[in-house]
Image (cartoon, rainbow, N blue to C red):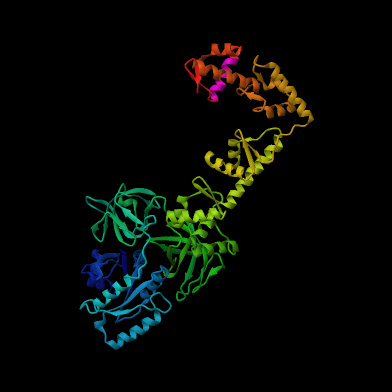
Amino acid sequence: MKNVIVGTAGHIDHGKTTLIRALTGRETDNLKEEKQRGISINLGFTYFDLPSNKRVGIVDVPGHEKFIKNMLAGACGIDIVLLVIAADEGVMPQTIEHLDILNYLDVKNGIIVLTKCDLVDQEFIELVKDDIKEKVKGLFIEKASVVEVDSVSKRGLDQLIAKIDELSENIEEKKIDSPSRMSIDRVFSLKGFGTIVTGTLIEGKIDLDDELTIYPTEKIVKVRNLQVHGQDVNTAYAGQRTAINLSNIKVSEIQRGDVIAATGSVEESMMIDVNISLVEHAKKSLKHWDRIRIFHGTREILCRIVPLNENQISYGESGYAQLRLEDKIVAKKGDRFIIRSYSPMETIGGGVIIDTAPKKHKIYDEKVIEALKVKERGELKDIIEEYLKLKLANYITLKDLISYTGDNEEDIKFQLDALIQDNKVVQVNKYYMHINQYDKLCQRIVEILNDYHKRYRLRNGILKEELRSRADNNLKVKDMDVILNKMVQNKKIKIEKNLVSNYDFEVCFNKKQLEIKKEIENKFRKNGLSSLLTEEEICGKDKFYKEVFEALIGETVQKINDEQFLDKKVYEKVKNDLVNYLKKNKEITVAEFRDLTKSNRKISIAMLENFDRNKITVRIEDKRRLF
């Protein structure tokens, strides 16, 4: 079932609250000061049922210019606006400002409600209608119906209700499969219940007992109870006026303007890329570093503007800009916002958020402008690719992409698969890398290997762990393994016994090195198991001997521990004899191993400890068994 929010707009004392009372039978002015002064100060909320049985939520906003901030908070999430204009006064300044705001917030449906029609004759009403028609030219409400009503006598209310019912059929379905998000417009507590927040659920759904996060404070809360239009529900859906009873948080820890959302589903930012449009009638242009106020959701934030196309954005025109914020914004791409001048405060424009996680831009950068155009077009596949392209220093997860784009997991996965097929994105376990980032990392690995092979010409390769730490220590071992295996498949590198080398690298001994190699191998062969030799005993201080010796480790020379080495053939024979012995006898002591190998106790202990480290044997008290 569609969830519809109807909001009022219009100048002070044009009869918005009286109209709502006539439609619903309920009063939305609840503050003592509102009743004393006869004007709306805060937001009012109620509901009523249409003939089609749809229950419609109503937001009644204040019309006085001093309370425009409250009006902006209430305009968030409106589907149908009732533009209320008193027949005896016609279009007034706040009528125009409210219209500008609704236009920039991309409200698509509206009805012009002419109130107090019993105070003037029909001829005057027709003159007012002509004026209205002129004032709303080019705006979303240009072709809206004009309904004449008198809220006291209730004349015209049936026609108005029928028109609301008709428009409600055209309301777009909200995204209920996206992560939940709601801008908070009221915070209060009730005895016996605790903290309660209200707002219009922008997207997704909220269930009882859900764990959510309050942004930007990032406090985790739990949904204790849910109400929609004053009734307890198990689930609240996008497009509904919702009251949420929260546990684990005090009223003092939340304020209007905060966002309650699925944990990790939104990004906080101190800088956003936007497309801004300025109204012509305000005659206010924006230059580099002008200080302005933006209103997003139910939050007001001060910021500085950096125009990107030109030195300034002129009134009546639009352009790309970067906003450097003075407080955190919690937003998603595609969100709408309103701009008001810093002082004096007046609505001068609005815009749409293109990127919530940009880098700092300079003016006249064509690459930046083209990238913003791609993001603004809204093709999810292009947006994902552009985001990954800009995040070359980071490793991006699916969760990051959901938070950035605001789209659901299934759609993002589908587009990621397409990008992988197009060879534009590479998946590395839970991370997604743009092909530029992946190629750069592969190039870095090859450069490290080239340098290593120049320095150690007789070594078979670099250890995997050393390569990972030098290439990018932020990558986990399992992630580097995926990348290295891809490089092996593409014949860029090869891996043998945990050593990585360039694909075409081979150890090559020259004549002198071959002579040294033969001499070292003969020493080990003659020594047998009579002792375990050290590097110094084999090479002395000769750097050429050391270079060849290092190349033989793992090939014809076996490393026993950090200091001692043995002929590899002798080592393999001792290992095989030990395995065969244990298969027959189950266990062996150091003394029995000494007798088996015809060596001494010192050599036996060193050998057995090596077998323990290599998981050939396991020590149990003073005996060894097969691992």
Residue 269 shows up from this direction:
no
* Depicted 341 relative to depicted 191: above or below: below
The N terminus lies in quadrant: bottom left
Q: Position of residue 271 (x, y in %)?
A: 49, 57
Residue 231 shows up from this direction:
yes
Q: For this view, does 505 lie left or right of residue 134?
A: right
Figure quadrant of residue 12:
bottom left
Q: Position of residue 504 (x, y in %)?
A: 69, 41
Figure quadrant of residue 2:
bottom left
Please tell me which residue lies in front, 593 or 453: 593
Please tell me which residue lies in front, 81 or 168: 168
Q: Position of residue 527 (x, y in %)?
A: 69, 16
Please tell me which residue lies in front, 538 or 300: 538
Please tell me which residue lies in front, 52 or 535: 52
Q: In the image as oriented, which residue stretches furthest toward the right?
A: 511
Q: Residue at x 71, y 38 (%)?
A: 454
Which secondary structure dominates the residues rendered in magenta? helix
Q: For this view, does 63 lie left or right of residue 397?
A: left
Q: Is residue 612 magenta?
A: yes
Q: Residue at x 35, y 79 (%)?
A: 91
Q: For this view, does 118 lie left or right of residue 262?
A: left
Specify the segment rendered in magenta: 603-613
Q: For this view, does 510 lie left or right of residue 424?
A: right
